[in-house]
Image (cartoon, grey):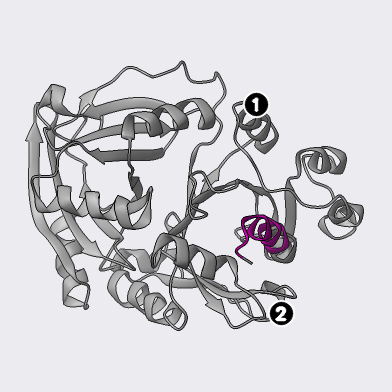
Amino acid sequence: MTETIDHTPSTAREADPFPVKGMDAVVFAVGNAKQAAHYYSTAFGMKLVAYSGPENGSRETASYVLTNGAARFVFTSVIKATSDWGRFLDEHVAAHGDGVVDLAIEVPDARAAYAHAVEQGATGLVEPYELKDEHGTVVLAAIATYGKTRHTLVERSGYDGPYLPGYVAAKPIVEPPAKRTFQAIDHCVGNVELGKMNEWVAFYNNVMGFTNMKEFVGDDIATEYSALMSKVVADGTKKVKFPINEPAIAKKKSQIDEYLEFYGGPGVQHIALATNDIVATVRAMRAAGVEFLSVPDAYYDTLGEWVGDTRVPIDELRELKILADRDEDGYLLQIFTKPVQDRPTVFFEMIERHGSMGFGKGNFKALFEAIEREQEKRGNL
């Protein structure tokens, strides 16, 4: 196993040809956006803030925008496909089930970002254009990434509406909890085919100027039965982080193989959500019906010996099945949901960081074994 960390000085951002401000939204194509919005409101504690649908002029699609702190999810379903975009969404849900179609990135200049990306070899999907309403102007463009996923480039510094022109403010579906379950999107993980990981790492290096933050290969990211390889790319500020996984040859089917089979190709595997109180988050989400992966009690018997002191006592971590890991910069606490739809594809991670900018390297084996137990129940190992 090798692990590399980029130490590019922050001053290099001044000359960055593709500066980013952060994640703008994670956009899902779903079969029933109204029901999805209700699920994420009640189970994840998110707040509905904006809507677009037939009632305000969108005859083709219905979209619900939910937020929690800086994290923004958009759920879109097709009412009746009449355009290329509507047909794309229809076909996407039919082929992949509910899944992420867009990892939208906020940029200071969408035109410049798009021009640079295309010049560096990105496939342009939507050339820059403006949307306007009484709240101001947004500039949008889109480029392709792995599978059918895209990056919409969003320039919204001149806009103060609830989301985008064409959306209206919406009342919450349920009253959100007094304490947020999470605050931001920490990272978004993509699964790609065998042999394609380095190709997409190079894409982010060349097109967006992202650097290689971490690399995980070898025995520490394998179990007795399955294996995978992973590399993490990030922008210079580390606000946008994209781990990219590919399967590795092993005795049985890995979680990546299972995803690729049931998703029908490459796509977003999971979204990590940053929380400042993972205990309260897990208790609230469990009470709302969210199912998390479980690890054996034996994991916690020696945890304190190598993780050391953490904000949450070991006994409470054991009770809630929360994982912990420590590196040279600090420690983190993390837990993973089971897939949030019938297909064993998209799931979520809750992560609480205390200095560590890692991804739970010490937990990989325990996590993968937990996933394998679920795969075995499904008959997919």
Q: Position of residue 151 (x, y in %)?
A: 28, 58
Figure quadrant of residue 5: bottom right
Q: Is residue 315 left or right of residue 38?
A: right
Mark 2: amino acid: Asp
Element under label 2? helix
Question: x and y percent of residue 76 in the render?
Answer: 28, 40
**On screen, residue 200 above or below 41:** below
- Classify the position of the C terminus by image quarter: bottom right
Secondary structure beneath disc 1?
helix
Amino acid type for the residue under numbered disc 1: Ala
- The picture quadrant where one finds residue 172 is top left
Front in this rendered view, residue 309 or 85: 85
Write the residue at 67% across / 73% down.
221
The residue singled out by tag 1 in the image is 287
* Point 10% across, 56% down: residue: 128
| Residue 367 image offset from top left, x and y in percent | 69, 59
Q: Say if 168 sits above or below 231 in the image.
A: above
- Answer above or below: position of 348 versus 356: above
Judged by depth in the image, the label closer to the viewer, 2 or 1, is 1
Range of the magenta residues? 368-380
Magenta stretch prevailing secondary structure: helix
Q: Is residue 128 left or right of residue 326?
A: left
Q: Is residue 56 found left or right of 350 in the rendered image?
A: left
Instruction: Tell which circle, 2 or 1, labels the residue nearer the N-terminal end.
Output: 2
Whether residue 371 can be seen here: yes
Where is mark 2, residue-wise?
219
Screen quadrant of the N terminus: bottom right
Q: Residues within 10 Å of mark 2 (few under 14, many from 20)?
A: few
